Image: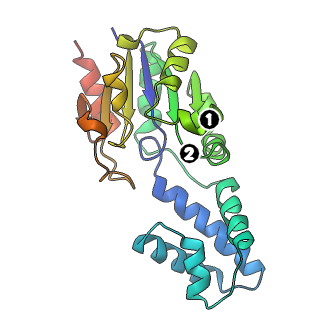
Amino acid sequence: MIKAVIFDLDDTLISERKYIESGYKHIASLLNTQGIGKQDDVYNMLSNLFEESPINVFNRLFESLNLSYTTSDIRKLVNEYRNHFPTINFFDDVVPCLNELRKRGLKLGIITDGYASSQKAKLSSLSASNYFNEIIVTDELGREYWKPHQKPFEIIKEKLQVEYEEMIYIGDNPEKDFYISNIYPIKTIRINRKGVYRNRDYMDGIREHYSIENLDSFLMLLDNWD
């Protein structure tokens, strides 16, 4: 019997692309106040550079603008990006699903990787604590405990007071979200949000138990759960 549903955050509950857009708008506004380019132009440049490659976007921005820069300049922009308060929302199917799961008496949790400051700002912007019983930002445990490490799953199991076989984990990233089922008897579900990391390879070939397109499909799957 399923008693708890645990979710990934990025590209599962929210669009990582929308978060990136929010961050780039913040950076474009910041640079504009420093006299570096028009805000809309800089934002478009950042977006286009990201589409070309997500590597060293800020460095390449300065180079595209023929501006000299230092390591300190880049570090400041990275910190601004990671610490900005984002303008983001849950995907449209999230809150109705969470409300239905709560009606059914299921416990809800989040396990999310990413820099702690960024993830906590996202969670705060979403008022996520209003919906979830427990939230684990793995970076607060230590970088070595990011998924696919089992420690965050062990912690949330104890906090929610359920057994592993009573848990479902819903994520999107094949590189790290489903390997846990090779360690503990947690059922895993892959949601296809067409997200930033959708083309990653499965870790050791460990695949999800079920695949869905949206959370409405998850509720239907749950209705027929054995």
Q: How far apart are marks 1 and 2 (CA)?
A: 11 Å
Residue 117 located left or right of residue 154: right
Q: In which quarter of the image is residue 224?
A: top left
Indicate how the structure is coloured in the image: rainbow
Q: Quadrant of the N terminus?
A: top left
Q: Which amino acid does label 2 sit on?
A: Gly
Q: Quadrant of residue 128?
A: top right
Seen at 46% across and 58% down, the residue is 17
Query: Please, is residue 69 above or below residue 159 in the view?
Result: below
Residue 83 located left or right of residue 165: right
- Residue 144 position, x and y percent, is 55, 36
Q: Circle 1 — which element?
A: loop
Q: Circle 2 — which element?
A: loop
- Residue 47 position, x and y percent, is 49, 73
Q: Which of marks 1 and 2 is in front?
A: 1
Name the residue carrying label 2: 114
Mark 2 crowdedness (10 Å alpha carbons): few <14, some 14-19, many ≥20: some
Q: Which amino acid does label 1 sit on?
A: Gly
Q: Quadrant of the C terminus?
A: top left
